[in-house]
Image: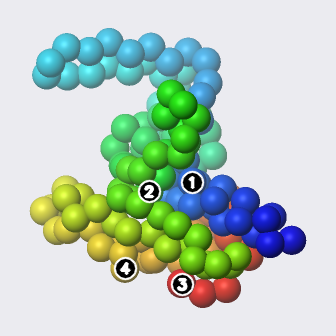
Amino acid sequence: MKKSIKIILTLTFINILFFLSFGQGLAVQSDKSEITIGLASQPAILDQQRITSNNDIYVTNAINETLLSFFDKDLNIVGGVAENWEFLNDTTFKIKIRDNIYFHNGRQVKAEDVKFSIERIMDETTGSPQRVDYSEVKEM
């Protein structure tokens, strides 16, 4: 049971705000000043906590930084917005936010922003398909 809670929490935080998906038809071309990405269709929504299609995921992942990323070349979970993370006990997960992360308006990203995003996912009125992943979260 304790190990399953760790797994659920780890997967949950990987999905935070933010999750990565691989699909077909992605073409990328780049030079030093711009990037062109070919998609199968126009993204339907850019609200990262409500997206469900691969096209929406591709675009929002290009716009937003994730808290944690899936894996590096050695299959380790790597940080994005998170500088480091650890389990304090079987049910408590602690994440340190990097100091050099800023929103587009220049405001620094804080732990309260991550908390807000998770609470928004957990809020039934948001309609997030990720809500079920947070059913075990008791408090933040």
Left or right: 90, with 33 as reference point: right
Q: Which residue is mark 1?
A: 14
The kind of residue on which mark 3 rests is: Met
Query: Which disc number belongs to residue 59?
Result: none
Residue at 37% across / 38% down in the picture? Answer: 62
Q: Residue at x 58, y 35 (%)?
A: 75
Q: Is residue 22 visible?
A: yes
The reply, left or right, for residue 32 in relation to residue 93 is left
How many residues crowd mark 1 within 10 Å: few (<14), some (14–19), many (20+)?
Answer: many
Q: CA distance from mark 1 to mark 4?
A: 18 Å
Q: Which residue is mark 4?
A: 112
**Residue 134, quarter of picture:** bottom right
Q: Residues within 10 Å of mark 3 (few under 14, many from 20)?
A: few
Q: Residue at x 29, y 62 (%)?
A: 98
In the rendered image, the residue lying farthest to the bottom is 139
Real-space Cα separation, disc 3 to disc 4, in angstroms: 10 Å
SS at circle 4: helix
Q: Mark 3 or mark 4, which has the lower sequence index?
A: 4
Three-letter code for the amino acid on which mark 1 is drawn: Ile
Mark before the other along the chain sequence, 1 or 2: 1
* Kind of residue at disc 2: Leu
Disc 1 or 3, which lies upstream in sequence? 1
The residue lying toward the viewer, choosing from 76 and 102, is: 76
Determine the secondary structure under disc 2: loop
Q: Look at mark 3 in the image and give the residue it sits on.
A: 140
CA–CA distance between discs 1 and 3? 16 Å
Q: For mark 2, what is the residue?
A: 67
**Percent position of residue 67, x then y:** 44, 56
